[in-house]
Image (tube, rainbow, N blue to C red):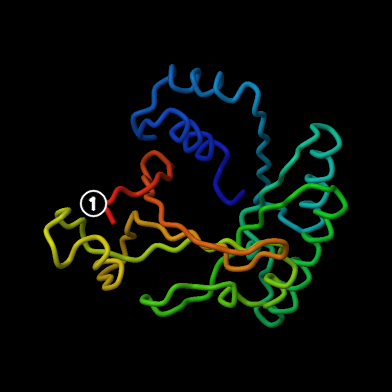
Amino acid sequence: LEMRPERTMRKMVSMVTGIDDMNLVTSDFINAKNEFADKPFYLSYFWDNVTMDNVEKVFTLARKRYGIKIGVFDNLHFLCRNVNHITQEVGIVSKRFKQLAEKLKIPIILIVQPRRVDVNNIPSSEDLKDSSAIKADADKVLILHRLPMVSTPEIGSGGGGMADLMIKPLDESLHPMTMIKCDASRFSSGGQTILWYDGAKSQFRYATQKEI
């Protein structure tokens, strides 16, 4: 994980309880623990020695020891630092994650950075940073896209509402309206939806008609 375990846990407790992560108290962590009692998850954090070999060892041991049924790695580009051969390096790492998933017989969610695109364009699977091998190796590619905004306008004011702001972004803070698009899928058709992201609670929900 790119985020420290302590911070990840606060985000997960906030997500489960629906409480802003800045307002969490001890009882919230106890309630979240009970919620996750039959949904065990395991965090691995070794920022000082991140190599693909070590990642494979951690996933393999977790599968054997704990029987994990899904894995997540954040993010692929953290493993690829050779600026002179970045495309080849990304391609090799992507292939090794694919082989690891096949070996362990579990899905692995691999978080990938997109390359920079024009702010008014929606990224696609062709915009995954540094290598087309990522799309080729993946069974599914999910794109999460949010646009910049200045501030939240009044809902229903007409002209310059939420939907308009999605088309005409103005600064670097991100709009909570999020497009989630299945841009590539090996075994099924793709699709997309719009969800509302509450960053303070780490929750997605369906956007209301007024918000759209």
Residue appearing at x 80%, y 34% in the figure: 67
Of all residues shown, which one is farthest toward the front?
A: 189
Task: Please give left or right for residue 202 compared with residue 83 in the image.
Answer: left
Percent coordinates x, y for residue 65 in the rendering: 84, 32
Quarter of the figure with residue 174: bottom left
**Residue 109 position within the rendered picture, expressed as x and y whole percent measured from the top left:** 66, 53
Horizontal side of 102 relative to 73 (left or right) equals: right
How busy is the neighbourhood of tag 1: few (under 14 within 10 Å), some, or many (20 plus)? few
Vertically, is 59 above or below 88? Answer: above
Determine whether 201 is above or below 131 in the image. Answer: above
Amino acid carrying mark 1 in the image: Lys
The residue sitting at 66% across, 49% down in the picture is 72
3 in relation to 86, above or below = above
Q: Nearer the viewer, residue 22 or 111?
A: 111
On the image, which quarter does residue 44 sit in? top right
Rendered-image quadrant of the C terminus = bottom left
Residue 135: horizontal and vertical position, in percent?
68, 71
Q: Which residue is mark 1?
A: 210
* Label 1: which secondary element: loop
What's the residue at 80%, 53% (across, down)? Answer: 101
Q: Quadrant of residue 158?
A: bottom left
Residue 126 location in percent, x, y? 59, 77
In front of the other: 9 or 148: 148
